[in-house]
Image (spheres, grey):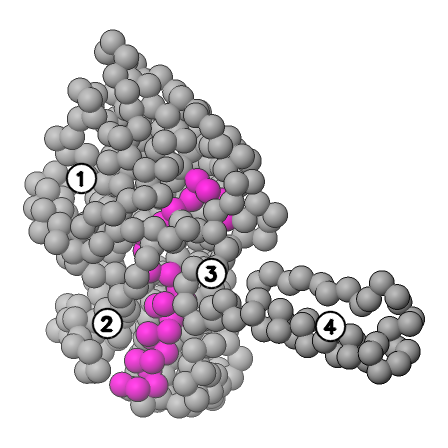
Amino acid sequence: MIYQSVGAAEEGETLFKGTRSSFVLLFSLLALLALFAVACSGDDDDASGGSAGFSDAGYKTAGLDKARVVTVDGDIPIGISSALTGDVASLGKPIADSAETAGDGVTIKGHKIKWVREDDLCSAEGGPAAADRLIKAKVVAVVGPICSGGTRASLKLYDDAGITHISPSATAGDLSQPTRPEGPYVTFFRVPVLNADEAKEQAKFASDTLKAKKAFVVFDTDDYGKDLSTQFQKFFKDNGGTIVGTPAGYEKKTTDFKSIISAIKEAKPDVIYQAGFYAEATPFLQQLRADSALKDIPYIGGDGIKNDELISGAKDAAEGAYLALPGTQGSQFDTYKKKYADLFKGNADTATFGAEAYDAATAIIKALEAASTDKGGKLDIDLKKVNEEIKKSSFEGASGKITFGNNGDRSGAVVRFFKVQGGKYVQLEAGKK
């Protein structure tokens, strides 16, 4: 929101003397109110993005206000920042594999792609550590980081290096609305549906489809969990619902949820909402459903929870769970699915954010083709032009149409709902439960 002050009159105290001066004061006040109303009218409380876009100062800070050419002799290094070990590796490895799938059989002006993987651990500590290693490896662009906390902690590092990076899965809304004079980081783009869009649809599903009036919210205390849970609470209240009890957060690697479950039992909610990852959702669901009084209360989880590991770990306790998954399947999904199966023996249908990773890598490859020049066997790559080409991306991908707004967020939002039935994720029709 932009505010502009309207001064009193040059006469100062004489403004209050006489009828004419009174009109001047009234006009000034009305002008101020009108200006305030116009400024606020562009705000968007309901969806992702925001009105602030990339600025000239932002490009200058990143050194992308002018040509920034690097020379590659041999294979072209493209980075992948993902969780390759730890509790969410079952999310991170398919993302990394899917990104590499986009480069299968691809050359750029005769040069092959060299994928450089670094483990960002899906954490605020691992993100910048991985970014530092990728920058030192002289990558020309990066797919990732994959989680909001790691992305937030890495933004300045990539920006200082002028390295454009596209996250397939970092969904916290404020990543593209940082508090800094230069506005959004011009080197940061992302292809997932944002938390606000997902939470809005989850709250609508809880209110309209499940007819829930009271919700109990639990969440992972990292950036992703806090933001998604906050957004859900907002939209659920907007729909006339009530958040009962005290919303309870938990740290990663938590396995004992007895105190939270006790609070849920006392609050008597109509629906239980969890924002986090499958590693903690698995023991939570097991302990929740072990209490007969809580066995049948509807449960809704976010995209970080929808993973095959949840079903294999929670088993019967996962039955009946509702999981939301942002995004859709685009015209290139079948191509991605076949290549992914051939290369990595993976199942694209269950690779959360796999299609988005494939599309993020595709956007980078297309940009590199346009931004590189053959120089007698070597390749000159203009990082400024890479950034420009990514910004104007427009193609049909595995996750749908890929275009970016002026703050790096993907345009458009689709959220699908699944229910665990018979040990499988079954996609629901709109309005069905």
Task: Decide which of tag 2 and tag 4 comes sooner along the chain.
Answer: 4
Would you name the residue on which mark 1 appears? 101
In the image, residue 30 lies at what x, y percent? 68, 77
Residue 417 tag number: 2
The three-letter code of the residue at mark 4 reads Ser
The CA span between labels 1 and 3 is: 32 Å
- Residue at 50% in and 55% down: 52
Task: Decide which of tag 3 and tag 4 comes sooner along the chain.
Answer: 4
The three-letter code of the residue at mark 3 reads Gly
The three-letter code of the residue at mark 2 reads Phe
The three-letter code of the residue at mark 1 reads Thr
Would you name the residue on which mark 4 appears? 28
Task: Decide which of tag 2 and tag 3 comes sooner along the chain.
Answer: 3
The CA span between labels 1 and 2 is: 26 Å
Q: Is residue 367 on the magenta stretch? A: no
Task: Decide which of tag 1 and tag 3 comes sooner along the chain.
Answer: 3
In the image, residue 416 lies at what x, y percent? 23, 69
Task: Decide which of tag 1 and tag 2 comes sooner along the chain.
Answer: 1
The residue most toward the front is 20
Quadrant (top left/top right/bottom left/bottom right) for the C terminus: bottom left
Q: Alpha-carbon neighbours of circle 3 within 10 Å: few (<14), some, or many (≥20)?
A: many
- Residue at 43% in and 89% down: 240
Span colored in magenta: 184-209
